[in-house]
């Protein structure tokens, strides 16, 4: 070793150039600084990852809550529509039943009226036949009286 100043290692008793010793010491200090900074950055990254996970969970929970509310509103609306349609259907069925009942009643009244008219016509025909018979009998009697065949 030429002009370089050396020191003796207290552990291994080797001669080390002073520039190498400082260089090694600087490297060790830099390595420790880098390791500390790396650990710090790693911890910061973990913290940020944790924050991101928490934020994601919060956002997902809010989105789920909003979706649930939206679905609940839509479901409520659909239920009310179904109820309304059911009421309308029941009303239409009731109206149809009432109309069918009225139609039956009208048919029954029509048949009863036709039957009553037929009976009255038959009764009137019978009465007319009786009156005609009586009239013919009276005419026959009047003819017989005029002929003189009838004696009183």
Image: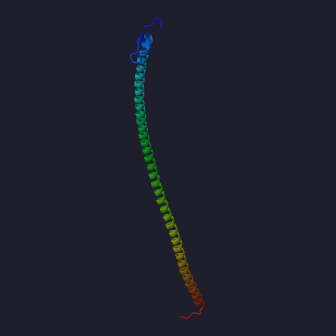
User: Is 3 rendered above or below residue 122?
Assistant: above
Name the residue furthest front: 13
Q: How many marks?
A: 0
Name the residue furthest bottom: 151
How has the structure been colored for display?
rainbow
Name the residue furthest right: 147
Q: Nearer the viewer, residue 152 or 19?
A: 19
Q: Nearer the viewer, residue 148 or 80?
A: 80
- The residue depicted at 49 percent of the width and 67 percent of the height is 105
- Counting from the top left corner in percent of width and height, residue 94 is at 46, 60
| Quadrant of residue 55 within the rendered picture | top left
Left or right: residue 59 versus residue 132 is left
- The residue depicted at 48 percent of the width and 57 percent of the height is 92
Q: Nearer the viewer, residue 113 or 14?
A: 14
- Counting from the top left corner in percent of width and height, residue 109 is at 50, 69
Name the residue furthest top: 3
Q: Nearer the viewer, residue 17 or 11?
A: 11
- Counting from the top left corner in percent of width and height, residue 125 is at 56, 78
User: Is 56 rendered above or below residue 77?
Assistant: above
User: Is 60 rendered above or below residue 150?
Assistant: above
- Counting from the top left corner in percent of width and height, residue 79 is at 44, 50
Left or right: residue 31 versus residue 128 is left
């Amino acid at each position: 070793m030429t002009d370089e100043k050396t020191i003796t290692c207290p552990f291994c008793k080797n001669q080390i150039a002073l520039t190498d010793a400082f260089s090694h010491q600087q490297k060790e200090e830099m390595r420790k600084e880098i390791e500390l900074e790396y650990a710090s950055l790693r911890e910061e990254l973990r913290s940020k990852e944790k924050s991101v996970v928490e934020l994601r969970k919060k956002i997902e929970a809010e989105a789920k809550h909003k979706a649930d509310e939206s679905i609940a509103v839509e479901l409520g609306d659909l239920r009310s529509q179904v109820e309304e349609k059911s009421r309308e259907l029941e009303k239409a069925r009731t109206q149809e039943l009432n109309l069918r009942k009225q139609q039956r009643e009208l048919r029954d009244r029509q048949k009863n009226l036709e039957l009553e008219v037929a009976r009255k016509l038959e009764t009137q025909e019978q009465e007319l036949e009786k009156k005609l018979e009586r009239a013919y009998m009276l005419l026959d009697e009047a003819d017989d009286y005029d002929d003189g065949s009838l004696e009183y």
